[in-house]
Image (cartoon, helix red, strand yellow):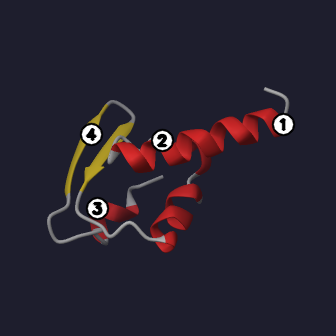
Amino acid sequence: AGDHLLEAPLSLDQTTRRAGDALFVQGTAMLSQRLRWWLRSFGPNIEVLGPASLRAELAAEARALAQIYGE
């Protein structure tokens, strides 16, 4: 899902590495509503590892969605 970041980096300091089917992308980005929207657009195909506050925010949102959908 993130292969486009190899051609159009998220930030100037972006680094990427592959591990099996996973693509790990790290870089500096401003925490904004636009970034949150973009991350959400990947649905279950993304895991935010940091910062911890953003990870917690998206995890809480995922739990709320799971309740709505009966998980």
What separation in Å lies between label 2 and label 4 (alpha carbons)?
A: 24 Å
Q: Toward the viewer: 55 or 11? A: 55
Q: Residue at x 40, y 47 (%)?
A: 53
Residue type, mark 2 in image? Ala
- Residue labelled with disc 4: 18
Quick one: label 3 or label 2, which is nearer the N terminus? Answer: 3
Q: Secondary structure at mark 4?
A: strand
- Which is in the foreground here, disc 2 or disc 1? 2
Residue 27 place in picture, x, y as percent: 23, 59
- Under circle 2, the secondary element is helix
Of discs 1 and 4, which sits in the foreground?
Answer: 1
User: How far is the residue under mark 4 from the one under mark 3?
Assistant: 11 Å
Tell me the element at label 3.
Answer: helix
Looking at the image, which residue is at 54% across and 47% down? 58
- The residue wearing badge 3 is 6
Percent x, y of residue 42: 56, 54
- State the CA–CA distance, disc 2 to disc 1: 20 Å
Where in the figure is residue 23, as x and y percent of width and height?
A: 33, 43
Q: Nearer the viewer, mark 3 or mark 2?
A: 2
Label ID, residue 56: 2
Chain-order first, disc 1 or disc 4: 4
Q: Type of residue at label 3?
A: Leu
- Nearer the camera: disc 2 or disc 4: 2
Mark 2–mark 4 CB contact (< 8 Å): no
Q: Which mark is residue 69?
A: 1
| Position of residue 17 in the picture relative to residue 65 (left or right) | left
Measure how far apart labels 3 and 2 are at the Cα level: 26 Å
Which comes before the other along the chain, label 3 or label 1?
A: 3
What SS does tag 1 mark? Answer: loop
Instruction: Say which quarter of the image contains residue 28.
Output: bottom left
